[in-house]
Image (cartoon, rainbow, N blue to C red):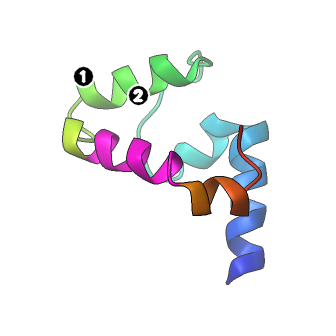
Amino acid sequence: MMNSLLNTFQLLKSDPISVLSKRFNLPKDLKNPNDIIQHLLNTGQVSQEQVNQAMQLRNNPVIQQMFHLR
């Protein structure tokens, strides 16, 4: 499970559109993470609350250490 999560995270870092397109409807021309988030919000595919929760999770020190963020 942890290896799968780490592999997905590495793929997400290298090719976010490919990973996210498996779950969301995204145009191929989006490259910037902020543009991706804005598109998902604008099209109702995610809520602002979901974005906020993801950002809180990303800013969690345990998660940052686990994925070597920052």
- Quadrant (top left, top right, bottom left, bottom right) of the C terminus: top right
Secondary element under disc 1, as helix, strand or loop, is helix
Give how far across and how far down residue 66 sits, in percent: 71, 63
- Magenta highlight on residue 38: no
Give, as a three-letter code, the residue at label 1: Asn
Q: Residue at x 71, y 45 (%)?
A: 69
Seen in the image, is 53 located left or right of residue 30?
left
Q: Nearer the viewer, residue 70 or 13?
A: 70
Give how far across and how far down residue 11 sits, in percent: 76, 50
Q: Earlier in the sequence, mark 2 or mark 1?
A: 2
Residue 37 marker: 2
- What separation in Å lies between label 2 and label 1 (alpha carbons)? 9 Å
The span shown in magenta is 50-60
Give how far across and how far down residue 28 sits, in percent: 59, 23
For the stretch drawn in magenta, the main secondary structure is helix
Q: Residue at x 39, y 47 (%)?
A: 56
- Quadrant (top left, top right, bottom left, bottom right) of the N terminus: bottom right
Seen in the image, is 60 located left or right of residue 54?
right
Residue 42 marker: 1
Can you say whether 41 is above or below 30 in the image? below
Give how far across and how far down residue 33 sits, in percent: 55, 24
Give, as a three-letter code, the residue at label 2: Ile
Seen in the image, is 18 located left or right of residue 42?
right
Q: Residue at x 56, y 18 (%)?
A: 30
